[in-house]
């Protein structure tokens, strides 16, 4: 591993270990799943106190109704807030639920957003199409690494800047500290989607006000659960759950407590998984680069923001499990993915990421297809871009042999390696 500049001293795993352990109802080492939609009280007068906010889940252990707070979901929220170095976190039904709830809480009709133009296609469509049509909230998209353009896009109605810590699928790094300074100078909030970089980057340390996650990806790691999380100040999370104006409370994308339990059980090995995803991605990309395959990975020294990214990283989790190869055309990308899947079982042609197996997709015709051809060109999504979320099954040498053979078979590499 080449770590060129000092990294942060923050250790998210130590923070996770500091979260007060919740034992099961009968002394089980794991917390119980509180599979109740509603909660009883010992005295009738307690109920209005809960409704008025005078008795709360965190301070008094008082719960009201499952869509508001559930003890199991609440525990997972505390754990994710701890690794994100945020006061509070709340978990919901999907990453899109987290993103939409955070944005709707911060913006009202007529407000404005400045967003990175390099974001997941669903987020892009939500900002470009859904919000103006349904809520009168407009977004200006700007390259996240062009701070002057970001500043120029800000208006008196700008309430937030939105970016992904590492963008999907172009792997552009957000300069979170600079974006935070910019947002705060204009009394706006900085919202960071940290889905690609759990544990690796802690956006709050660099000035983010709100951090959102799709728990569907690395956090759960098994491609079996859809979930999301929003982290922020205690005040912000309380606002999200407000009975009259809370976006999570009123739109209702609630996480099931059984799901919260599952995700919570996987957090203790998230660090091991991230380190292995990263170790393999760095090794494969280094070898691809030597063979002059057009590969993009922030761990490679030639990535334009390698130094910036390195300086933001928490030590021990590497540069992440995602890289891309430009196969030159959609046909060539499809041929490569089909050979890798059907001949070698190197991985699967599927969207999503952060799985134990390798997942491959041609972003322009899948997870970024919400962007027009012009928009894709502007953000650097070439038609042949294959996004690869590298898994950790099999051995590294076995996977390298398969990848190298497939690239040769498809005429994408002529050198031996
Ligand atoms: N954020 C990023 C960076 C993503 O890649 C995705 C989905 O691919 C999402 C958010 C949305 O997450 P979910 O599918 O859990 O709603």
Image (tube, grey):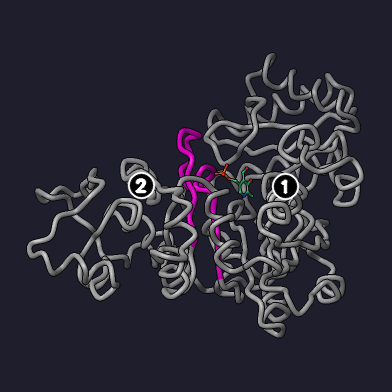
SS for tag 2? helix
Q: CA distance from mark 2 to mark 1?
A: 28 Å
Q: Residue at x 21, y 64 (%)?
A: 62
Left or right of 240 in this view: 208: right
Residue 285's disc is: none
The location of residue 44, given as percent across then percent down, is: 11, 64
Left or right of 97? Residue 250 is: left
Tell me if I can see residue 386 in this picture. Answer: yes
Ligand 1 within 8 Å of the CB at mark 2: no
Image quarter where the N terminus lies is bottom right
Residue 85 or residue 339, whichever sits in front: 85
The image quarter in which residue 151 lies: bottom right
Q: Is residue 260 above or below residue 18?
A: above
Identified at 67% across, 20% down, the residue is 341
Residue at (14% x, 55% y) in the render: 40
Residue 34 position, x and y percent, is: 23, 47
> Where does the C terminus fall, quadrant-wise?
top right
Q: Dot 2, crowdedness within 10 Å: few (<14), some or many (≥20)?
A: many
Could you tell me residue 130's position as x and y percent?
Answer: 69, 50
Q: Is residue 229 on the magenta stretch?
A: yes
Residue bearing mark 1: 125
399 versus 72 height, above or below: above
Count of number-bearing discs: 2
> Which residue position holds label 2?
260
For the residue labelled by badge 1, is the local secondary structure a helix, a strand or a loop? helix
Give the side of residue 196 with respect to residue 44, left or right. Answer: right
- Which label sits in the foreground, 2 or 1? 1
Residue 292 seen anywhere in this rendered image of the structure:
no
């Amino acid at each position: 591993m080449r770590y060129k500049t000092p990294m942060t001293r923050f250790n998210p795993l130590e923070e996770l270990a500091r979260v007060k352990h919740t034992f099961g109802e009968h002394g089980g080492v794991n917390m119980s799943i509180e599979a109740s939609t509603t909660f009883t009280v010992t005295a009738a007068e307690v109920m209005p106190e809960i409704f008025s906010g005078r008795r709360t889940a965190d301070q008094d252990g008082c719960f009201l109704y499952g869509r508001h707070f559930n003890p199991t979901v609440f525990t997972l929220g505390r754990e994710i807030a701890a690794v994100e170095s945020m006061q509070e976190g709340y978990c919901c039904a999907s990453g899109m639920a987290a993103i939409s709830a955070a944005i709707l809480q911060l913006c009202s009709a007529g407000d404005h957003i400045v967003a990175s133009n390099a974001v997941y296609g669903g987020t892009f469509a939500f900002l470009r199409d859904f919000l103006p049509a349904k809520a009168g909230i407009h977004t200006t998209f700007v390259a996240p690494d062009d701070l002057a353009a970001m500043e120029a896009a800000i208006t008196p109605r700008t309430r937030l800047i939105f970016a992904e810590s590492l963008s999907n699928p172009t792997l552009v790094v957000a300069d979170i500290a600079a974006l935070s300074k910019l947002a705060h100078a204009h009394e706006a909030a900085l919202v960071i989607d940290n889905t690609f970089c759990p544990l690796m980057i802690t956006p709050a340390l660099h000035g983010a006000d709100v951090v959102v996650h799709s728990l569907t990806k690395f956090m759960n790691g098994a491609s079996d659960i859809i979930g999301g999380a929003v982290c922020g100040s205690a005040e912000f999370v309380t606002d999200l759950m407000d009975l009259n104006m809370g976006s999570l409370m009123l739109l209702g994308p609630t996480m099931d407590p059984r799901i919260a339990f599952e995700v919570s059980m996987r957090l203790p090995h998230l660090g091991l998984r991230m380190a292995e995803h990263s170790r393999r991605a760095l090794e494969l990309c280094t070898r691809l680069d030597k063979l002059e395959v057009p590969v993009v990975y922030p761990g490679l020294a030639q990535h334009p923001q390698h130094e910036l990214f390195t300086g933001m990283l928490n030590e021990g989790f590497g540069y992440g499990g995602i890289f891309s190869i430009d196969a030159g055309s959609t046909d060539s990308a499809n041929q490569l993915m089909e050979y890798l899947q059907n001949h070698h079982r190197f991985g699967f042609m599927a969207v999503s990421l952060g799985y134990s197996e390798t997942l491959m997709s041609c972003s322009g015709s899948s997870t970024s297809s919400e962007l027009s051809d012009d928009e894709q060109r502007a953000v650097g999504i070439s038609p042949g871009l294959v996004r690869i979320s590298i898994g950790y099954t099999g051995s590294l040498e076995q996977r390298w042999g398969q990848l190298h053979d497939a690239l040769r078979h498809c005429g994408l590499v002529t050198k031996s390696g």
